[in-house]
Amino acid sequence: MGAAPRLTVVGGSDAAPSLEVLMRKVALGDQEAFSRLYDELSASVFGLARRVVRDSTLAEEVAQETFLDVWRLATRFDVQRAGVKTWVMTIAHRRAVDAVRTSEAQRRRDVHAIIEEYSPDVVAEPLIAADDAAEVRRCLDSLTELQAESIRLAYFNGYTYPEVATLLAKPLPTIKTRMRDGLIRLRDCMEASR
Amino acid sequence: MTEELHTLIGAYVLDALPEEESAEFRDHLARCETCRQEERELRSVAARLSDSDAVTPPAGLKRSVLAAAAQTPQLPPVVAPFGAARRRWRPYFLLTAAAAAVGVVAVSVTDFGGEDRITPLAADVVAVFDATDAIDETVDIPGAGTLKWAVSEELGAVAVDMSHVGDLSAEQDFQWWLIHDGAPVSLGVMGEAELGQRFPLPQEGDLLAVTIEVDGGAEQPTSEPLVVIEAESHTGG
């Protein structure tokens, strides 16, 4: 009998396993790893969902759907294509935007709908390393106003780019170009500060 | 066109493309490695936009997520990470065909002068080109014009538009073939007045080919195909 191949955890440490290591375990059905992954990412996911859907109850639903997607699709996660956090946040954003678009459609149908206010029952806490959040804010400040507005309205309000163009009274090609060059500028800004 | 389409990458990673354009863009991404690289980079930027918004969810959420996960089966792994395998369509000229086609074309197809013919395409052909999920392509046939085709998975159909391909002599017709496991089956002859044709979607690995045959068609292809379209499997999404 030959020696069994040796499996080594790469990038782990004595402290906390990396998100990549957790993801590999989740893909194998490890519920403990899933629980830890939830601890690592739930504040980011819930925070994004709440910012987009502006309702804590709905945000919880979005977060729950997101994590269930993560659980179900963990087997298909490919670290070559995206980092764990990027992948999870991509799912969360799609879920949040879907929720906001669906509820918008429902509201349009229901003339008596009461527009829900941003519910202030949860107090935001700085859970992402303050440096990282500050870096994002600083880089956002380096954008032109139109770049920043286009990105904000699309990402946080869930508007499509034709809707953004209408709101800002700009031609479609201008808006789609600003979204792209704004993101490119953010990328360059974040890379530069590394 | 591609550059124009490519600009949409910003809106795409922000989930701000309307559904139809999103499908079109995914198709663009599937064919463009440098675009996928840009997508990866911009996505990781977008994923950080809400860094300042992180907030601990109510404790009940974790219990409910873990309980739901415990009862939810995981999907089996596939090679494609973000979606199921999809079919992709591309034309190629068989190596021999590329050379042979020029010879065949020279004697039998008049060079296309660039004028549209007046007869419109049949409605069932147009329907495929107009389908919301249609992927269309154009391919040059050396010396004989351009062939357009569209694939719609929704309609389960492929349509070809040969209105920009030169005329054949009266003794010849274009004939389309489905090549399954290497065996050609006729899909029909295109009469003089017919400019387009619609076929059911071939299976993965099948080939669609068009040859020039005697007026009325042949039992088996007797000339090298002008164009061969392959339905190949790829990973994308």
Image (cartoon, coloured by chain):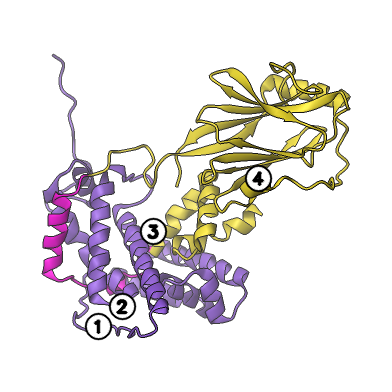
Chain colours: A purple, B yellow
Name the foreground residue: A99 vs B215: B215
Other-residue count near label 1 (Cα within 10 Å), few / some / many at <14 / 14–19 / ≥20: few
Residue A129 seen anywhere in this rendered image of the structure: no
Residue B78 in the figure: left or right of residue A29? right
Q: How much space separates mark 2 and mark 1, taking CA atoms?
A: 7 Å
Q: According to the image, label 4 marks what residue?
A: B124
* Chain of the residue where label 4 is placed in the rendered structure: B
Q: How much space separates mark 1 and mark 4, taking CA atoms?
A: 53 Å
The answer to which image quadrant residue B49 occupies is bottom left
Query: In terms of secondary structure, where does tag 2 sit?
Result: loop
Q: Which mark is residue B31?
A: none
Q: Residue at x 46, y 63 (%)?
A: A188
* Chain of the residue where label 3 is placed in the rendered structure: B
The amino acid type found where label 1 is placed reads Ser
Magenta extent: B47-73
Query: In terms of secondary structure, where does tag 3 sit?
Result: helix
Residue A13 in the figure: left or right of residue B203? left
Name the N-terminal-most of marks 2 and 1: 2
Q: Tell me residue A37's x, y (percent).
A: 19, 55
Other-residue count near label 3 (Cα within 10 Å), few / some / many at <14 / 14–19 / ≥20: many
Q: According to the image, label 3 marks what residue?
A: B44
Q: Which mark is in front, 4 or 2?
A: 4
Is B118 located above or below residue B65 in the figure? above
Q: According to the image, label 2 marks what residue?
A: A54
Query: In terms of secondary structure, where does tag 4 sit?
Result: helix
Q: Check contact, mark 3 vs mark 4: CB within 8 A.
A: no
Q: How much space separates mark 4 and mark 2, taking CA atoms?
A: 46 Å
Q: Which mark is in front, 3 or 4?
A: 4
Quarter that holds the N terminus of chain A: top left
Q: How much space separates mark 3 and mark 4, taking CA atoms?
A: 43 Å
